[in-house]
């Protein structure tokens, strides 16, 4: 989709993972992984404009002190990758306003990279297809392709195509609790390997769980799927950060349909019956002072979208 504008403003959602299944470490250095994605109504905003001195970026908002304003930012890496793909110079400036917490398992960095791919593609009138943008995004990070379209999908591992999911007419209502400390994804997977060795669990067990994830009727009412909401990274993350166990137990105590950790942590996601229940849980969590941030979000929602002036 071409654009005649020299400046574009895009919003991109966070994500939760209703299910994550992880297998043993493979020879290529990656773990086999199967995960369900859902885009939710918590948004970063990225403004993309032409700048002959670019690429450059300014970052403000939530956790901006944790987000590099350098060429190490995934937004800059995404712009450079697309520019190389279409054989132009990445003459662009970004203004990123964060609302998605950093290092929280909500996919903020990957979401921002997806917004950069879509925004630059429009600004430069490159006419690269969504499918090709998703393919490029996989070289930046495993979660990046999902945010191009959002809604719900199944990820099948490193650089594997996503499987889109039907979502029916159902709305999922989440209360998100962000602990005071984040977690390193690398450290979580290292601890997962320790857990796997202790359980003596291998590839056959993973393949069974993978098939189970693929067979879940994800378009059904969320309340009927709570038994399918599970994250294999929860145990290793809780070993590294015991506050996660405390938080998940608190969710069960206030009647959450389901309590699970999102991604590799440390955000905990609590499924509510309805909006009143969500507001009740939010108030209880704020009273308990378990989290540095508590918010309500809805899903599924579309991925990167252009904001009107």
Image (cartoon, rainbow, N blue to C red):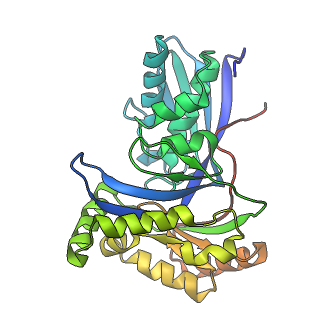
Q: Quadrant of the C terminus?
A: top right
Q: Give the side of residue 185 with respect to residue 89, left or right.
A: left
Instruction: Choose top left, top right, bottom left or bottom right for residue 185.
Output: bottom left
Residue 280: percent from left, percent from top: 71, 80
Instruction: Choose top left, top right, bottom left or bottom right for residue 221.
Output: bottom right
Q: Is residue 43 above or below residue 231?
A: above
Q: Give the side of residue 121 with respect to residue 274, left or right.
A: left
Residue at x 30%, y 70% (from the top left corner): 240
Q: Quadrant of the N terminus?
A: top right
Residue at x 63%, y 63% (from the top left corner): 218
Residue 131: percent from left, percent from top: 56, 32
Q: Could one spot residue 45 in this view of the protein? A: yes
**Total number of numbered labels?**
0
Depth order, front residue of 71/135: 135
Q: Residue furthest bottom?
A: 253
Q: Give the side of residue 34 with respect to residue 174, left or right.
A: left
Q: Give the side of residue 146 with respect to residue 245, left or right.
A: right
Depth order, front residue of 192/52: 192
Residue at x 74%, y 63% (from the top left corner): 171
Depth order, front residue of 191/232: 232
Residue 106: percent from left, percent from top: 51, 56
Q: Is residue 99 above or below residue 253?
A: above
Residue at x 43%, y 45% (from the top left corner): 142
Q: Could one spot residue 54 in this view of the protein? A: no
Residue 41: percent from left, percent from top: 68, 54
């Amino acid at each position: 989709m071409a654009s005649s504008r020299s400046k574009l403003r895009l919003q991109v959602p966070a994500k939760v993972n209703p299910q994550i299944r992880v297998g043993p470490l493979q020879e290529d250095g990656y773990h086999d992984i199967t995960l369900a994605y859902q885009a939710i109504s918590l948004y970063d905003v990225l403004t993309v404009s032409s700048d002959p001195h670019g690429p450059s970026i300014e970052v403000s908002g939530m956790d901006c002190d944790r987000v590099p304003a350098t060429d190490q930012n995934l937004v800059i890496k995404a712009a450079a990758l697309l520019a190389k793909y279409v054989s132009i110079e990445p003459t662009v400036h970004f203004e990123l306003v964060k609302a998605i917490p950093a290092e929280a398992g909500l996919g903020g960095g990957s979401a921002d990279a997806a917004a950069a791919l879509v925004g630059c593609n429009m600004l430069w009138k490159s006419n690269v297809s969504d499918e090709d943008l998703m393919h490029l995004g996989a070289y930046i990070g495993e979660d990046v392709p999902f945010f191009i379209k959002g809604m719900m999908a199944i990820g099948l591992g490193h650089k594997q195509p996503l499987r889109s999911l039907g979502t029916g007419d159902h709305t999922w209502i989440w209360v998100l609790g962000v602990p005071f400390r984040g977690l390193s994804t690398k450290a979580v997977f290292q601890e997962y390997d320790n857990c796997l060795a202790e359980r003596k669990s291998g590839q056959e067990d993973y393949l069974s769980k993978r098939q189970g994830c693929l067979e879940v009727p994800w378009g059904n009412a969320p309340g009927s799927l709570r038994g399918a909401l599970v994250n294999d990274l929860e145990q290793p993350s809780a070993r590294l950060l015991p506050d996660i166990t405390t938080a998940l137990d608190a969710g069960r105590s206030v009647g959450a349909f389901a309590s699970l950790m999102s991604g590799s942590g440390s955000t905990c996601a609590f499924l509510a019956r309805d909006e009143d229940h969500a507001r009740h849980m939010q108030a209880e969590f704020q009273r308990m002072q378990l989290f540095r941030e508590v918010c309500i979000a809805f899903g599924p929602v579309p991925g990167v979208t252009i904001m009107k002036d």
